[in-house]
Amino acid sequence: MAIRLLIFDLDGTLVDSSVDISNALNYAIGPYGIPEVSISETIALVGEGLTRLIGKVIEQKAPGLDLPPLVDRFLEYYSVHLADNTLPYPGTEKVLQGLGAYRKAVVSNKTESLSVKVLQATGLIRYFDYVAGGDTVSEKKPSPVPILDVLSRFDAGPEEALLVGDSIYDIEAGRAAGVKTVAALYGYGTASFSSQADCRITSIEELPEAVRQASG
């Protein structure tokens, strides 16, 4: 059956937000004497949502530190500066325009409100019919629950959808929901994350061909 619904991850798939997330992390940990988190370290940590992101920083750099105050400080900074340096990957808008015949959704582990703000700030919001965050349904990726929720909202079968993401959490969620998956190798994931994906792309500009192949 032909693909009619495209489901996208956000950070590392549609936009490069690593600098702004890293800046917010360092603002959050600044008063606690924790060594700064580099952009490369940030990239290795993202993917499971804010609480896990900061939790992993604490585990690595300051075991035993209380989590909630750091989450609050992160949100204090990030909600204002979430698009200071965040930009769509080159070619993203052109690709989304070219895929205008398809319904499109974003499923991020970032909260829904912050996901919408990033899409608004980068001008991408107009290309999407629906945006879900890590707090939209009861579970986050790699659970299939958010993907199954999107399928239900669009009255689409798994065979009619394609998920595009840059992490193992995306690929596992897509596979568990029964949809075909595209690994965005240009994003934040390590090389091994794509081994279970149905297709791999090294640039978002390769996505239209991947969609055509998936439609078979």
Image: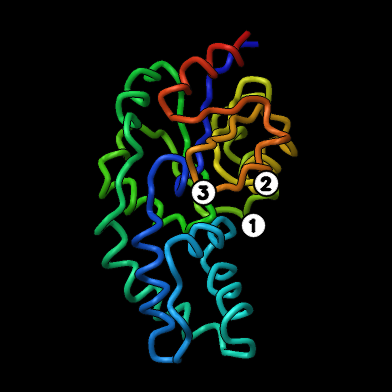
Identify the mark at residue 138; answer none if there is no mark. Answer: 1
In front of the other: 81 or 145: 81
3 or 2: tag closer to the N-terminus: 2
In front of the other: 91 or 176: 91
Residue contact between numbered discs 3 and 1, judged by CB atoms under 8 Å: no
Q: Residue at left 41%, top 16%?
A: 101
Q: Residues within 10 Å of mark 2 (few under 14, many from 20)?
A: some
Q: Position of residue 199 (x, y in %)?
A: 62, 25
The residue wearing badge 3 is 188
Q: Residue at left 58%, top 86%?
A: 62
In front of the other: 51 or 183: 183
Query: In which quarter of the view is residue 140 placed?
Result: bottom right
Q: Residue at left 63%, top 90%?
A: 64
Query: In which quarter of the view is residue 163 placed?
Result: top right
Q: Amino acid at mark 3?
A: Tyr
Q: Position of residue 79 (x, y in %)?
A: 32, 67
Residue 130, relative to residue 138: is it above or below?
above
In front of the other: 102 or 52: 52
- Under circle 1, the secondary element is loop
Q: Amino acid at mark 1?
A: Ser
Q: Amino acid at mark 2?
A: Val
The Cα atoms of the two marked residues, 2 and 1, are separated by 8 Å
The Cα atoms of the two marked residues, 3 and 2, are separated by 23 Å
The residue wearing badge 2 is 145
3 or 1: tag closer to the N-terminus: 1
The Cα atoms of the two marked residues, 3 and 1, are separated by 25 Å
Q: Residues within 10 Å of mark 3 (few under 14, many from 20)?
A: many
